[in-house]
Image (tube, coloured by chain):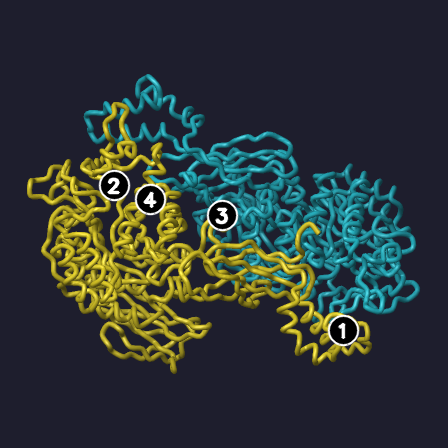
Chain colours: A cyan, B yellow
């Protein structure tokens, strides 16, 4: 026969027809679905075959929940590239029994022929014996068995999905040793990752001054993203921050307190970077031989140079960049925040991430791809563990709903990390809304996404812009040293939210796939449920209601739909304030002050 | 580099990752879309490359309508398997000009370096000369060009998409010569295809009697689907219907009047079929050697036998079945209605259709796959030109909307053919609704789908069921001879609808992709627009409103939305009755008698 009689179609998860792997985390039960089609009416069976990296193929049965659509899950317990496929076959034993029973029920008297067929199929015995043997026979004797193509699944550790991030400029905290001192406090607040802006030597040539002034004054310290000076390049530590040994000590302190350090990986070089003289061919030049600097007209970045991805020395360049990451991995770093990956070739990232993970499989990469959806998603597909998103710019209910729906449509391959602020982005909503806006945005970030982060100063509601209509900070820390301590009115809320996130897998054990919107009456109220099911059973549900208006109280109704699987009377505790409420399936009256929120936790009895 | 820097993703149309071809018809401009991604900000270009069967590759430019998403069309002018792919490249010329202009606009004074680069790129000349040359240079000098994989497109003639079908039992019309006599009338009514139920000799052993009685009386004529007798099998003509020469003459008369004849292809054999003795191994036997008959417990079809698709003589069986089709093609038949294809292996159909089309490329196959969506769609993907649908069972507004939306989601590969009745299905809605129900269902079938058909008797509103709660006809024509003539109250409406369909490409020049639902107030009113655009410009639009209630008048409002592109004041003519109306963008009052409809035609000025 030209092709097998059973067809396996519509296998999911599948990213771009298998061009890229789907994603999962260690400890997940990975869902899989496939349509299995064969002519006729006979029963079909299907199983998922799956293979850990370096391990042997295993198998789990799939079941049919809707016609012709098989589904199930399989457990993944190790980091790396898994493989999976679906096998389907004809269950002639079940088919025979069903036909036999239907004929018997229809009063068909003479079944001699059928029984002779049964004996051929089952061997000697009675129909009852055959019925008992059928399930085992069906699983082992696989008639007309076919297998789908093999797909890949990229399994990472849980930190790839969930984590509370805190971003800081080490120079504002007394260098690497100063950061080490604040680690216990950050741990007590419940942060999982402390992300350091670049720690490398900073160029002096064309250095930018305070507030991004084109000319620096002698005392100006420059932007940490203008990487490279006589004292070193991407593998160096800025002398005023400390030494490699200080970094290793900081990693150790973090480890002691359950905090991981993340470094920044920005592929750009100050005019003083050693590579400019050591490897001139790695950089773009004008026809007259002069070096090109980075620009995006009318903006000019004369303090940094980009590499020439079309250089003849491409292999050496790629290897050198990989070795930068491996250097920091050797120092104990396993998390990297990658600066502007969308301005570098996608195949480079696909190669780099695979190279690093072949040595350090547990390495997590956060993509700072503030760019259009096509490139943002392509980088996620190419291997980034997680990605910055458009969250910062999504402030109205309509914007937030559209934003979350877009993330949900990407959930096979893109894991979001939601940041209400970054050193580059102080949104007008925060500038104008003050503390209530900071609070609302924090609750949204921490309860919508398993990963979220804040840039330091957020806890103190810092919101002075450089200029009206812009998103830059006044006296941006990018260009000067602050003298920071952990302080601010949002610290208690941060601690409560991070506690809730750790206590409730509904918030961090899964992506946005299972989020359910709750209908609200009241234009500024947004509400959603984060259900958590184990083996299909609802174990807990977190109901979040946020007043998006930072200036006024909002009162209205929040509707808990029947479809959520909650009891008619719902006893909940507000995780933010500890108050207990009795809600109902149906309409619930809500009244929230400016920017205030409910984070209501419902737990199933016995759970 | 490991992989090209430009990536082409999400290419459409693509059916199951290219496992099957998408479909189009001769004369179409085939739409194509792809996401093209590259790092950085430089301009990209893309084109579709396409290749007719046996011809050479051609090219058409694509344009960017939304960010990173290229789209366009290409014309197909021949039947067969076309190939297509997308090519994308970097437009360095445009990139240079844009950067130059932005710097100039920003007042950047010294552009010496930039101009030197420009000269390297464009050659000697001025910026104005370069600007003039840029489009041509961009089209020919393709930097970093990449091509997607090659996909296939199955192009059929327009009859694969659109046609009005009339099904008849030739024995009720005086045999093949009698049918030839009625062809001019059917042509005058506007039918495109006359589909004859099986014309082959009918078995006598275990013949079914009238009303599907298990035992036939001596005078009973049997079911035409119990194929095969001493006088011949699938390649024979029933002696009482005429001869092969009569069929060829009928084909010729059809041709003269613009009507195609369709034959039925049912792979099942009466106990008297010559193949049972000539090729016993092609059929299933019990262990005791007795032949199995077809059954679907508790139903038994003792008058027919199915073939054994697992036979060792598979190749001979497949070839014999193919030769049946080729035999009728040689007699001039180019349209086949295939009986129950879902009970035969999909790979068989994929092979058979390709084999037949390698000799007669213009052959159209209609799939009678009244089965679950997975198999119905898989047969369409495997090569059937068009498919029966669930239309017969979709009678309420909600059912119809869901039905049409499902068809729309399949439009890359499944072309629907809507039948309000068949010899097997007389729906309760027609039994109870009488003539108004027949009228409403006819308007729906003829205006929702480019292909529709009726089984004879529909025009006379025949609706006597065999029993209550069933869908079988009383005194079904399947088991007895009627003496039919073309007559009945629906003939004028049939003629008007077929005229409208031929006059308006909005109804038959496209599938359901462009259908737009119109909001109605009035539970029993359903309304939709069928717009027709040429090169993006709206040329005509047919607005259909149907009162689904066969018992009562419905009055209400039909809302014409802004999005339809119609003028504020819409002058329309009702194609059913010729009356003129002035409608508006907005709310229009509608009042329709039981089962009555508007088919309002709007034509753009100058069109």
Q: Are marks 1 and 3 in contact (CB under 8 Å)?
A: no
Q: Earlier in the sequence, mark 1 or mark 2?
A: 1
Q: Are marks 4 and 1 on the same chain?
A: yes
Q: Residue A42 vs residue A541: left or right?
A: left
At a point 85% along the width and 47% down the height, the residue shown is A176
Q: Can you tell which of label 1 and label 3 is closer to the viewer?
A: 1
Viewer-side label of 2, 3: 2
Task: Tell me if mark 3 has few (under 14), some (14-19) or many (20+) residues whose alpha carbon lies within 10 angstroms of its own.
Answer: many
Residue A323 lies in quadrant: top right
The answer to whether B328 appears left or right of A56 in the picture is: left
Q: From where the camera sits, is residue A275 visible? A: yes
Measured in 3D between alpha carbons, the distance from the residue under mark 4 to the one under mark 1, in whole angstroms, is 65 Å
Residue position marked by numbered label 4 in the rendering: B342
- Structural distance between the alpha carbons of marks 4 and 2: 13 Å
> Which residue is at a point 69% across and 62% down the rendered structure image?
B40
Local SS, label 2: loop
Q: CA distance from mark 2 to mark 3?
A: 63 Å
Q: Nearer the viewer, mark 4 or mark 2?
A: 2
Element on which disc 1 rests: helix
Q: Tell me the tag on residue A583.
A: 3
* Of marks 4 and 1, the one in the foreground: 1
Residues under numbered marks 4 and 1 in contact, where contact means CB atoms less than 8 Å apart:
no
Give the chain of mark 4: B
Sequence-first disc among 4 and 1: 1
Q: Secondary structure at mark 4?
A: helix
**x and y, in percent, of residue B142 in the image:** 65, 64
Could you tell me how far apart the alpha carbons at marks 1 and 2 are, in whole angstroms?
Answer: 75 Å
User: Which residue corresponds to mark 1?
Assistant: B119
Relative horizontal placement of residue A275, taking residue B229 as reference (left or right): right
Residue B83 place in picture, x, y as percent: 49, 57
Name the residue beneath numbered marker 2: B268
């Amino acid at each position: 026969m030209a092709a097998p009689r059973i067809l396996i179609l519509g296998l999911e998860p599948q990213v771009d027809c298998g061009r890229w792997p789907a994603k999962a985390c260690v400890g997940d039960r990975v869902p899989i679905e496939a349509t299995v089609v064969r002519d006729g009416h006979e029963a079909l069976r299907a199983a998922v075959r799956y293979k850990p990296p370096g391990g042997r193929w295993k198998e789990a049965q799939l079941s049919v929940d809707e016609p012709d659509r098989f589904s199930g899950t399989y457990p993944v317990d190790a980091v790396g590239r898994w493989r999976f496929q679906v096998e389907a076959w004809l269950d002639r034993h079940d088919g025979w029994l069903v036909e036999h029973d239907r004929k018997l029920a229809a009063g068909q008297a003479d079944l001699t022929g059928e029984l002779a067929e049964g004996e051929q199929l089952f061997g000697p015995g009675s129909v009852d014996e055959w019925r008992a043997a059928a399930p085992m026979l069906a699983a082992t004797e696989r008639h007309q068995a076919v297998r789908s193509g093999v797909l890949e699944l990229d399994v990472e550790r849980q930190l790839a999905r969930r984590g509370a991030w805190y971003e800081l400029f080490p120079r504002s905290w007394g260098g690497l040793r100063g950061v080490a001192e604040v680690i216990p406090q950050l741990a007590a607040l419940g942060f999982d990752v402390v992300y350091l802006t670049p720690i490398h030597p900073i160029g002096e040539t064309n250095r930018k001054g305070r507030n991004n002034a084109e000319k620096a004054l002698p005392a100006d310290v420059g932007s940490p993203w203008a990487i490279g000076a006589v004292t070193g390049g991407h593998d160096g530590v800025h002398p005023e921050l400390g030494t490699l040994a200080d970094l290793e000590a900081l990693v150790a302190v973090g480890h002691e307190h359950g905090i991981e350090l993340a470094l920044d990986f920005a592929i750009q070089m100050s005019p003083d970077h050693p590579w400019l003289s050591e490897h001139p061919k790695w950089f773009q030049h004008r026809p007259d031989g002069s070096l090109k600097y980075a620009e995006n007209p009318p903006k000019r970045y004369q303090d940094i140079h980009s590499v020439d991805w079309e250089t003849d020395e491409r292999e050496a360049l790629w290897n050198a960049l990989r070795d930068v990451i491996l250097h920091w991995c050797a120092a104990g770093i396993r998390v990297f925040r990658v600066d502007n990956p969308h301005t570098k070739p996608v195949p480079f990232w696909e190669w780099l991430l695979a190279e690093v993970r072949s040595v350090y499989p547990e390495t997590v990469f956060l993509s700072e791809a503030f760019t259009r959806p096509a490139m943002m998603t392509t980088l996620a597909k190419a291997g980034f563990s997680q990605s910055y998103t458009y969250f910062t710019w999504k402030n109205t209910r309509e914007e937030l709903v559209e934003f979350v729906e877009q993330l949900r449509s990407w959930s096979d391959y893109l894991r979001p990390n939601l940041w209400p602020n970054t050193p580059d982005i102080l949104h007008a909503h925060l500038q104008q809304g003050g503390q209530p806006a900071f609070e609302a945005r924090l609750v949204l970030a921490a309860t919508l996404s398993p990963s979220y982060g804040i840039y330091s100063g957020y806890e103190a509601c810092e919101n002075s812009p450089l200029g009206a209509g812009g998103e830059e900070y006044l006296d941006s820390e990018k260009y000067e040293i602050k003298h920071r301590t952990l302080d601010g009115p949002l610290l208690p809320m941060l601690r409560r939210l991070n506690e809730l996130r750790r206590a409730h897998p509904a918030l961090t054990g899964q992506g946005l796939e299972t989020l359910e919107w709750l209908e609200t009456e009241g234009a500024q109220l947004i509400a959603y449920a984060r259900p958590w099911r184990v083996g299909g059973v609802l174990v807990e549900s977190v109901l979040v209601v946020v007043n998006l208006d930072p200036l006024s109280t909002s009162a209205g109704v929040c509707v808990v739909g029947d479809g959520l699987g909650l009891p008619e009377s719902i006893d909940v505790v507000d995780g933010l304030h500890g108050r207990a409420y009795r809600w109902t399936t149906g309409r619930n009256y809500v009244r929230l002050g400016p920017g205030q929120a409910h984070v209501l936790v419902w737990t199933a009895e016995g759970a």
